[in-house]
Amino acid sequence: MKKPASISTQNKLIILGLGISTVLIVALAIFAITNIQQKISEVYDDFGQILTKTLAIESVEITKDVQEFDKFAALQSHTRSIINSNREISFIEFRNNKNVIIYSSKKDYPNRAEEASIVSSAPMIADIEGVKSVIGAVSVGLSGSATANISRATKNSMLVVFTVAWLVFTVVVLINTLLITRELNILHHGVTKISGGDFGFKLDTKNTSGEIRDLINAFNDMSGRLHQYEEQNIDLITLERNKFEAVLMSIVNGVVVCDNYDNVILVNNAAKKMLEVDESQILNTKIQLYCDTDGELCFKEKIEQFKDTPLDIMENKPLEFNINIDKRVIKSIISPMFSKNQDYVGYVIVLIDVTKEVEIDRMKSNFISNVSHELRTPVTILRTYIDTLHNHSDDFDEDTKKEFFGVINKEAARLHKMVNDVLDFSRLESNNVNVEKENTDIVPLIEQSIQSMQVLAEEKNITFSLIKEPSLPKIPINSSSIERALNNLLSNAIKYSPENGRIKVRAEIARDTNYIEVSIEDQGIGIPEEHQKKIFERFYRVENDTHTVKGTGLGLHLVQITIEKHHKGKVFVKSKPGEGSTFGFWLPINPVEDESDTEEV
Ligand code: ADP
């Protein structure tokens, strides 16, 4: 781990301080020693001068009344006694006023003479008949050993003093530094804990001193506050997260969030349902490994494509594709996910169940194909028959012509119905259609509708029976749209009935309710259970892929809109394949009127 910068700066300062203090102490020591040595040699020089002068005076006194030839002996014995009594004196030399040596100890003490390092001289002045005259000179050689000894002793003492002072200083500085560093280390430990997220971590103030203790107390206080703040923050974050999760979980579309490494980090309820997985099966797994119901890795290729595409393109135009899970079609949209700082952090997959839309698309294209087919057939038939009648009417007898007109009539009716269905569909689908109603007896409407279907029924030798409850109340209905609905149901009953079948029409009060029930029961092909729920949807046809039974898939849808949307009623179907179907509806006797239902249809 990297050392805190303050510690290393501190170390540098200590080394610098120690270096400077060492240089200062050494310089001070050299200065003091040099100074002392200089003073000692000055004093020594003075001592030499005084000694020489004293000797000069003494020797004049000694030789004053002594004969010339005895002077040597007098001076020699005096000199010897001096030299023997003092090791400092190396030699003593006497000269007369003609500079001739009278006596020199160099001969007696040659070894000591060599030790001389300082020589000082003084004149020998005698009082001859009241006149002071120079009778000679005395030279004294001093060895200087005392100075050297004193100097050495001083130097050594000074060195010891300064070294001890330096050592004490250094030790004090180092101990102080160690103490401070130790306390700083305690603080450093605390700061590391805090930076690692251990808010609330407390340092021990034991064994700390002065300002550091204050600092540690302040640190503990700060740590406590951070802990408090963190707890408040966590509550806030948890709240925010709960809110976010609640929103995410209640979105009807599926949401799967993956991190940068394709791991699923979040999946909402809708997505779990659509992908048919538990949270434990998908969370923290790679989304590429998800298999659809056919065992295909349905996301793998698309995720790779997503990753190969530049992010800015994906951001503006997310990748869309469909996957199939258990007969359902799920549209998947992948878009990249960015942090606040615009760093790429993963991607979000939104899942939308488009089974219905895909089905409607399919039904629409079937519808278009059916309608074009359906239009072409009657138009071709009509053209052929009319053309034949127009050009060869004389060649046919009345019965054949009647038959031809019958076909023309039937095809025209079929065409009319189809065109009406398509027109009604687009008109009734739009929201601003309102229905004008009048209190009407529904039975005549049913009779009229049966009547209009009679021609169609006769072709298959189908018979109608009408069972009506006596004195049914009049109800507020729009006659023409109810008649169209009845026509649709009756024509279906005929269309899907076998030859010679029977169709029972009933009109009665629905049991224990406030509704009139109208039902049309046939003995036709019936409708399988799984289709029964869907046949009222627009374009839905049981026999969608075939053109065997003609139709558009709009009729029942229009019946439903008329009954449920415009009359607040309810449609129903009961059917068993091979046995027949009963289609019908309930109409309210006293409907709660919707204000918008006032426009004419
Ligand atoms: P279409 O124009 O195809 O008849 P509808 O909306 O009237 O359209 O009917 C939808 C589908 O419901 C039909 O394709 C048919 O399969 C089924 N159907 C409607 N009425 C009957 C019935 N009486 N018996 C059997 N099947 C029926």
Image: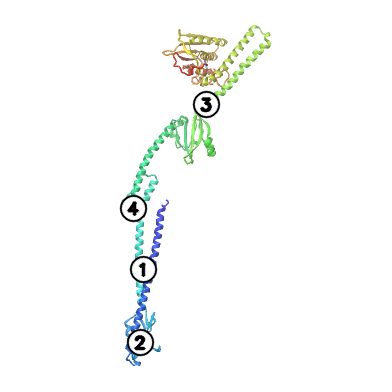
| Mark 1 lies on residue | 159
Residue 589 spot, x, y in % from top left = 44, 13
Q: Is residue 507 left or right of residue 215?
A: right
Separation of marks 4 and 3 at Cα, in angstroms: 76 Å
Q: Is residue 591 above or below residue 163?
A: above
State which mark lies toward you, 1 or 2.
2
Separation of marks 1 and 2 at Cα, in angstroms: 47 Å
**CB contact under 8 Å: marks 1 and 3:** no
Q: Nearer the viewer, residue 129 or 378?
A: 129
Q: Is residue 264 above or below residue 178?
A: above
Q: Is residue 9 above or below residue 113?
A: above
State which mark lies toward you, 2 or 3.
2
Residue 95 spot, x, y in % from top left = 38, 87
Mark number, residue 357: 3
Q: Residues within 10 Å of mark 2 (few under 14, many from 20)?
A: some
Mark number, residue 211: 4
Separation of marks 2 and 3 at Cα, in angstroms: 146 Å
Residue lying furthest front in this view?
Answer: 130
Specify the amino acid type for callout 1. Leu
Disc with the residue nearer the chain's start (1 vs 3): 1
Disc with the residue nearer the chain's start (4 vs 1): 1
Q: Is residue 420 left or right of residue 28?
A: right
| Mark 2 lies on residue | 125
- Label 1, secondary structure: give it: helix
